[in-house]
Amino acid sequence: MNPARRLLLANKSWAQERRAIDPEFFQRLAAGQQPEFLWISCSDSRVPETQLTVTDAGELFVHRNVANLVRADDANVLCVLQYAIEALKVHHVIVCGHYGCGGVKAAMNGAPPGRLSQWLAPVADIYQRHRQQLDLLSEDERWAKLVELNTVDQVHRLAETDVIRNAWAKDVYPYLHAWVYSLPEGLIQPLLTLSPKGPQKLL
Ligand SMILES: [Zn+2]
């Protein structure tokens, strides 16, 4: 079977099953969304946000890109952020990096010049900033540490956006979370939570 056809058939049976369990399910979703979370993660196919957080349709507003970056020159992520905070009023923004991230590795090893290396330049900058400390580690440890540093850095970048500054001038929300997902374990580890009052211990 054509692989794309497999997805369409799977969708049909999923819709039938959901309707059988909960006849109002799709009508409720069609009426509007009130997600509590904005989820920002890598495009990697092994980080399926709703599966690994056991959330349903309507619970996560999602933005994904290579290496889960929040770039001040990326209109896409900034529009997603603005809509999530100002219109949907999400209370939690989660940046979830993942160990084994190919984007982070490419930045660490020097991606070939081109669009991808330009995109990954902020990760390469983080590597350079922490190079003395990182180069003492084995390659795998260095890779994992850079994944963590990159994820935390994106949360600080979020905190510097006008959208978050404006929100924090009026409210204690949103909380900004840096999490990292382990592919071999299937587990998320929280690294940092920021609020207008500074770092928080929520977990
Ligand atoms: Zn990745």
Image (tube, grey):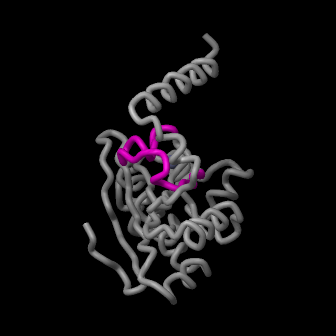
The image shows residue 127 at horizontal and vertical percentages of 50, 64
Q: Can residue 185 be seen by looking at this rendering?
A: yes
The image shows residue 54 at horizontal and vertical percentages of 35, 45
Q: Looking at the image, which residue is at 51% across and 47% down?
A: 28
Q: In this orientation, which residue lies closer to the viewer: 130 or 172?
A: 172
The image shows residue 181 at horizontal and vertical percentages of 37, 50
Q: Looking at the image, which residue is at 48% across and 59% down?
A: 35
Q: Can residue 124 be seen by looking at this rendering?
A: no
Residue extent of the magenta highlight: 45-65
Check if residue 55 falls in the magenta segment. Answer: yes
Q: In the image as oriented, which residue stretches furthest toward the bottom?
A: 169
Q: In this orientation, which residue lies closer to the viewer: 38 or 182?
A: 38
Quadrant placement of the N terminus: top right
Q: Is residue 199 above or below residue 187?
A: below
Q: Is residue 141 above or below residue 149?
A: above
Quadrant placement of the C terminus: bottom left
Q: In the image as oriented, which residue stretches furthest toward the top?
A: 1
Indicate the quadrant where residue 149 lies. bottom left
Q: Is residue 183 left or right of residue 23?
A: left
The total of numbered circles placed on residues is 0
Q: Is residue 97 left or right of residue 184?
A: right
Q: In this orientation, which residue lies closer to the viewer: 75 or 13?
A: 13
Q: Looking at the image, which residue is at 63% across and 22% down?
A: 4
Q: In this orientation, which residue lies closer to the viewer: 132 or 57?
A: 57
Q: In the image as oriented, which residue stretches furthest toward the right?
A: 114
Q: Is residue 134 above or below residue 139?
A: below
Q: Looking at the image, which residue is at 57% across and 24% down?
A: 7
The image shows residue 43 at horizontal and vertical percentages of 56, 46
